[in-house]
Image (tube, rainbow, N blue to C red):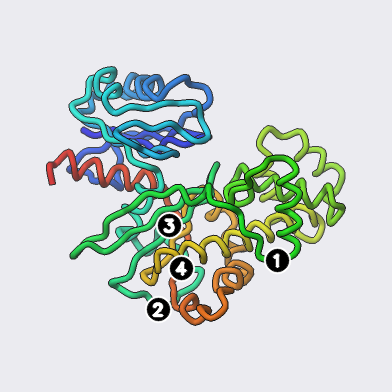
Amino acid sequence: MLIAGDIGGTKTLLALYTAERGPRRPVAQAEFPSARYERLEDVVSEFIGQTKARPAAACFDVAGPVIGGRARLTNLPWIIEEQALRSRLGLRSATLVNDLQATAYAAPRLLPDELRAIQAGEPDSTGALAVIAPGTGLGEAFLVRCGAEYHACASEGGHADFAPGNDLEAELLGYLRRREPHVSVERVCSGSGLPSIYDFLRDTGRAQDPAPLAARIAAAQDRTPLIVEAALGDPLANALSAQTVRIFVSILGAEAGNLALKVLATGGVYLGGGVPPRIVPRLEDGDFVRAFIAKGRFEALMRAIPVHVIMTQAALLGAAMLGLRRLQGS
């Protein structure tokens, strides 16, 4: 039996799998708030205790770089090591993989009902694929063709510099630079970064929300869900939230296009993470595609690149696929 997990800054999702049932039919699954635990082993031990399971192997995708079987999570004060997981949990093997690498591993194996097309394009069956995933942070990865299969490669592209695409975004960059010296694209293109856009628009007087909504957002520990809900529910009344999400979508489109150009992702771009499935109507209304294709002389190339939203837990699915494959020795 395999235990697989998607380890994020906000939540940890764990599941049990068998070779017979495969990666899409877990034996058991549970979600845990990551911040309540001091280390991953505590979460896994609790889950194993709940299920009375005896897994032989584990494969966990983590929100941070994995180097030499060791990971320090970017948005959570955890250090995770494969060797420690094996010894403390009594496992035969334990594998750590970057969460975007796991998502990328799953991407070409996703079923049609697990995707939502934003731009149909004209996919190149031999071309690279790209994955960009705004969740708590911003993850990026890509896949290159190796013979008959794709090889998934991790990156930390979300921590590259934020590049404004227009005058308003340039003002946003200046606003954020007064707070911190380095403004990565993650600071404005993630669940944790979206409130930065909201604050900029509010503080510069460009828009406002009704007073009761503004008070609820101000008091919330996590403001992003309320902002998104308001923007989708009544964009005319909730102008500040609506403009925040519009700018976010434009920045996401531009960065997805940047990633596609950098790896020449003619096979397609996949939008993963927790945010895109929640804002599909805004991704479909044109702003995303306009920003995605706005690459000057390469606009025609960008129009040919398919773009899909991943509508399932692809990181966990990828970890399960990879873990089962290794458990079976193939």
Mark 4, Cα crowd under 10 Å, few <14 / some 14-19 / many 20+, is some
Label 3 sits on residue:
131
Q: Position of residue 78 (x, y in %)?
A: 45, 26
Q: Nearer the viewer, mark 4 or mark 3?
A: 4
Label 1 sits on residue:
166
Q: Nearer the viewer, mark 4 or mark 2?
A: 4
User: Label 1 sits on what residue type?
Assistant: Asn
In the figure, is residue 7 to the left or right of 287?
left
First of labels 4, 3 by sequence position: 3
Label 4 sits on residue:
261
Secondary structure category for the residue under label 2: loop
What residue do we see at 48% from left, 58% from top?
271
Mark 3, Cα crowd under 10 Å, few <14 / some 14-19 / many 20+, is many
Q: Tell me how far mark 4 sits from mark 3, CA to CA.
A: 12 Å
Seen in the picture, residue 240 relative to 298 is either above or below; the reply is above
Numbered tag placed on residue 100 in the rendering: none
Q: Tell me how far mark 2 sits from mark 3, CA to CA.
A: 17 Å
Q: Tell me how far mark 2 sits from mark 1, CA to CA.
A: 28 Å
Quadrant where the N terminus sits is top left
Label 2 sits on residue:
122
Seen in the picture, residue 192 relative to 185 is either above or below; the reply is above
First of labels 2, 1 by sequence position: 2
First of labels 4, 2 by sequence position: 2
Secondary structure category for the residue under label 1: loop
Picture quadrant of residue 96: top left
Q: Position of residue 159 (x, y in %)?
A: 53, 47
Total numbered circles: 4
Q: Tell me how far mark 4 sits from mark 2, CA to CA.
A: 16 Å
Q: Nearer the viewer, mark 2 or mark 1?
A: 1
